[in-house]
Image: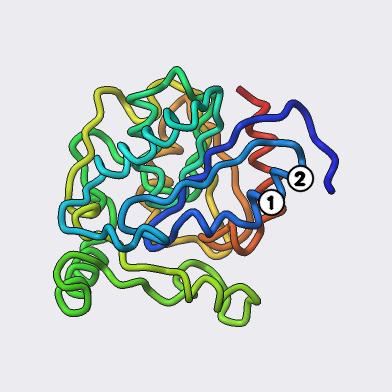
Amino acid sequence: MAEPSGRPRTFVLLHGAWHGGWCWREVAAALGARGHRVTTPTQTGLGERRHLLSAQITPETFVADLVGHVEAEELSDIVLVGHSFGGIAISGAADRVPERIRHLVYLDSLILEDGQAPFDLVPPEVAAARRALAREQGAGIAIPPPPVASFGIPEDHPLAPWVARRLTPHPLGAYETPLRLRNPPGNGLPRTYIACTDPPYAPLERVWHWVRERPGWGWEEIATGHDAMVTAPEALARLLERIAETG
């Protein structure tokens, strides 16, 4: 077992689109071995909650999922990590329950301002392609998962088949509906953006520029693909642990 490093912290790790809490398996194990408490909730309609998929799911559903998890588990002083689409819900949680959060970590994630929808941030051709897939293959309510290679996972990676088996359709309404915030993203809390740089995830180019142009944001990079929790779990766990000690 790994030796504990620093003070034990509480980490809440939130997955992105098409994923579920399962994707954090290796990172959660690494952090747990170092003495930290870790939870990995799954959002409505995804992963083991895929049976709840519906046209009514929006970003607000995901915010309510996350806030409900934090309150039900009676968590406080948490390091709240949102990967990819999960960045939307952690911004919502920061808006609703800031007193429970120690540090926000946006892992190669989307960041929405009040009134923006996820499709507003991705290139128009990406949004159009995903809407077409939802019409053709997702009964008009869900976007089928893309190949694992699109998440920066090489096809010959030992965990690529494991990821492919577990990806589930993502609710279309969560992409099309605006997020509502009372405060700027992050709500003044300590916050760090981690960019996955090898290879970079092209749909996030606009978000990276947004973060780099604003004061108050920490910036870190990890030389792996978009699904860093799969391709570089030990390095990511160490980085999260270091960030947890900064504020």
Residue holding disc 2: 33
Determine the image quadrant of residue 181: top left
Q: Residue furthest bottom?
A: 156
Q: Are marks 2 and 1 in contact (CB under 8 Å)?
A: yes
Q: Quadrant of residue 143?
A: bottom left
Report the residue at 38% width, 23% height from top: 97
Which SS class for mark 1? helix
Instruction: Report the colour scheme.
Output: rainbow
Q: Quadrant of the C terminus?
A: top right
**Front in this rendered view, residue 36 or 135:** 36
Apparent side of residue 215 relative to residue 61 in the rendered image (left or right): right
Residue at coordinates 83% horizontally, 46% vertically from top-left? 2
The numbered disc on residue 131 is none
Residue 213: % across, % down:
41, 35
Query: x, y (%) of residue 35?
Result: 75, 37
Q: Residues within 10 Å of mark 2 (few under 14, many from 20)?
A: some
Task: Tell which of 27 and 44 is nearer to you.
Answer: 44
Q: Residue at x 65, y 76 (%)?
A: 158
- Is 245 drawn above or below residue 55 in the view shown? above
- Asked if residue 86 lies left or right of residue 232, the reply is left
What residue is shown with label 1? 29
Q: In the image shown, does 78 or 178 lie closer to the viewer?
A: 78
Horizontal and vertical percent for residue 63? 32, 38
- Tally of marks: 2
Q: Marks 2 and 1, Cα distance to the nearest angstrom?
A: 6 Å
User: For the view shown, which residue lies furthest in the top direction?
Assistant: 99
User: Mark 1 belongs to which amino acid?
Assistant: Ala
Give the image location of residue 195, x and y in percent.
Answer: 53, 49
Whether 44 is drawn above or below 243: the answer is below
